[in-house]
Image (cartoon, grey):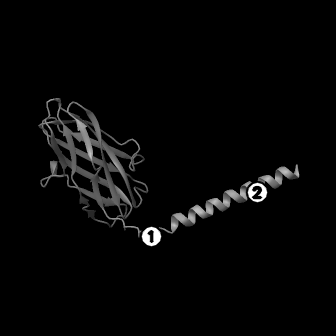
Amino acid sequence: MSQIRTLRRAVVTIVLAVGSLLLIQCSSSTEPEKPLTNRVYFARDVQVTAGDRFAVPIYFENNINLGAINIPLDYDTAFLRCDSVSFLGSRVGSFLIQTYGLHSTSPQILIGAIDSAAGAEPGSGLLANLHFWAYGFTPDTTLSIWTPENPHAGLNLGFRDTSLTGGPIVPEFEAGEISVKGQR
């Protein structure tokens, strides 16, 4: 029985030693961490074929606790249709409200999320997945998703912090691009 205890202690000691070495190696990175900013951005290098149904991830980064997020979007309508928006696995998945609106006659998407509790702590990650269909007749082309200069229904691109005194925050915005390969 004492041999089993000695063996267990040895295993625990080895696991702790290896874990400590891994932590030291991970924390001794030579690259400095980039400070967080407030921004909204898309996945890079989205490539699809005409006729595909696909998702385009949209991400956000924040450097303060956020209680609300509003993102109006436009996209190239001649070759795309947005079917839905999903918040599954997103940083706002636990928010009190996650919502989206798709305009029935124009290429507009409104994304919003509101929380009454802690909100989104500083960090970066997924906001939502935009689900599209590239029409089958789409030629080889690159299509864009952007935030409009004149927002829909007066809903501007913005974050709101969780304090009562904080004002709106206008995040940086990086447009998304979708490369479509036409069918031959």
Q: Residue 107 at x, y = what percent?
A: 15, 41
Who's the residue at 21% across and 53% down the image?
175
**Does residue 123 sit above or below 143 in this rendering?**
below
Which residue matches tag 2?
10
Outermost residue, right direction?
1
Who's the residue at 40% across and 56% down the image?
120
**Residue 157 found in image quarter:** bottom left
Judge left or right: residue 177 versus residue 160: left
Callout 2 crowding tier (Cα within 10 Å): few <14, some 14–19, many ≥20: few
Q: Residue 167 at x, y = what percent?
A: 28, 65
Outermost residue, front direction?
184
Mark 1: which amino acid?
Thr
Which residue matches tag 1?
30
**Does residue 17 sit above or below 176 in this rendering?**
below
Who's the residue at 18% across and 52% down the image?
147
Of residues 152 and 20, the one nearer the viewer is: 20
Mark 2: which amino acid?
Ala
